[in-house]
Amino acid sequence: MAKTTGKPAKKPYAKALLFGVLSLALYIAVFANEVFVRSTWAKGGVYAILPIVTVFVFSFVHGTFADSLMSSLGIVAKKKK
Amino acid sequence: MIRSRVIFSSLVAVLLLVILASPALATGEAVKAFTGNKFIELTLFNAVFLFIVGFIGGMVSGFIGSGGAFVLTPAMMSIGVPGLVAVASNMCHKFPKALVGAIKRHKYGQVDVKLGLTLGVSASVGVKIGIIVQQYIQRMWGEAGSNLYVSFAFLVILLTVGSYVFYDAWKSKKNPGPERISRLALALQKINIPPMMNFKTAGLRISMWITIPVGLATGLLAATIAVGGFVGVPGMIYIIGATSLVASATELVIAFIMGLVGSTEWALVGNIDIRLTLMILAGSLLGIQIGAVGTTYVKEHMIKVVMGTIMLIVAFSRGFAIPKYTNQLGLTHFADNLIPTFSNISFYIMVFALTLGAIIIGGSLAKAMRKKPAEERDRTISLETAVN
């Protein structure tokens, strides 16, 4: 269960902003090169590594942003009594 | 001596399962390359639509461990994505979402990684069996026969399991207190067939041979209706004896394993449209955070309520898909102009099921979070009174 820290945790605004910008930059990079990306990433064979690595990278960056954003908004796990 | 023999037999059994699982195509259907134009024009409307469906699906997945996939594939097809590309792109968003959800819920101490890995391996074998069954039905009765089998599987499994999950949630609501382990699970935990496995987070000890059918059934269902969790989570609760909190969290580990294997297969034949995957992921990674946080606030029976509700509504929606296939097989004679209407009704009911699930989760979370500051204030007041 969620750990009890005693005092309220600091809200990770800076982390949310940093990963938010990073996430946005990644999305812009993909969609600015949409035609190249969609066809190269769907070539199959050895190119199969591209979509798999891409979703791992996005899940880390965008996942960290989502986590920090929720914490900043106060949507955090209930502390165990 | 006995100990080393047990360890050896466990390793052999696990190795056998891994070998059997390696060629498993965790995709729900035989992987084949799509030869036509696989890329739709991604308009702003399409992108926002995928983001919203991803967000709602993510919320439900974070809460009950699965869900969303059954809506996303038809949702993508409704904006013109070819079926094989929709299945592949949907699966490719599923495993990173499951990974993020599993990590989040692991922080809350809800994930039994060992149980997830054990079931994940046998589930991959189950997927392979499911595909063989599907291919056999397709050979015998054609595409319509195969679709009819899928719809019947949806109906029968979701109606029976969903009704039981719902009934159990209602019982738990009437008798509050710690979640009770089912009598069946308690009896099965007493069966001592080596190798026995200890699952620390789930707090149980059970023979590996009991876990295998649960994993197989999860994979079989994933191969048939693309949502293995509708059997995996109830299987972990009622057969293995885990709590609904641990079961729904551990299902994310199974979804990650099956999704990774399946996505690799689809990526090899080049069917993934990464733009669609990333748009869904953008919404679902936000949604899954809310779903996961929600599990720490609500009472455990709420997980069963949401799961049972979605399962029953989805079963109902599949009922509308059946006339199309029975017509094709010549078993019924509904007017041709009614069939597309039935298909649309089926799709919108599924969207309703997912949205209702998200509303219940969001509503319960908002209610519990509003209650929290009031409780904290009351505690402070009572402490101050005690001091004075």
Image (spheres, rainbow, N blue to C red):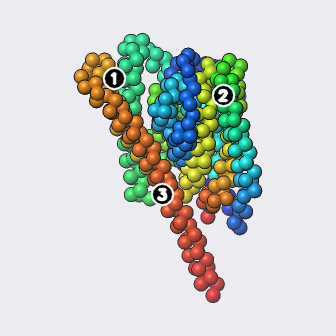
Residue B155 visible, this orientation: no
Q: How many marks?
A: 3
Q: Nearer the viewer, mark 3 or mark 2?
A: 2
| Chain hosting mark 2 | A
Position of B382 relative to B40 (above/below): below
Q: Which residue corresponds to the image point at 56% horizontal and 31% vertical from the top-left?
A: B41
Q: Chain of mark 3?
A: B
Q: Secondary structure at mark 2?
A: helix
Tell me the residue that label 1 is attached to.
B325
Looking at the figure, which quarter contains the N terminus of chain B?
top right
- Pick whichever, A79 or A68, lies toward us: A68
Q: Is residue B10 left or right of residue B378?
A: right
Q: CA distance from mark 1 to mark 2?
A: 38 Å
Q: Which residue is mark 2?
A: A35
Could you give the CA–CA distance between mark 3 and mark 2, rounded to whole angstroms? 41 Å
Identified by mark 3, the residue type is: Gly
| Residue beneath the point at 57% across and 47% down | B287
Callout 3: few (<14), some (14-19), or many (20+) C-alpha neighbours within 10 Å?
few
Residues at discs 3 and 2 both on one chain: no
Q: Amino acid at mark 2?
A: Val
Task: Find residue B363 and name its label.
Answer: 3
- Name above or below for residue B88 compared with residue A81: above
Query: Residue A46: where, in percent of width, then height?
Result: 71, 19
User: Quadrant where the C terminus of chain B lies?
Assistant: bottom right
Q: Chain of mark 1?
A: B
Drawn side of residue B55 relative to residue A27, left or right = left
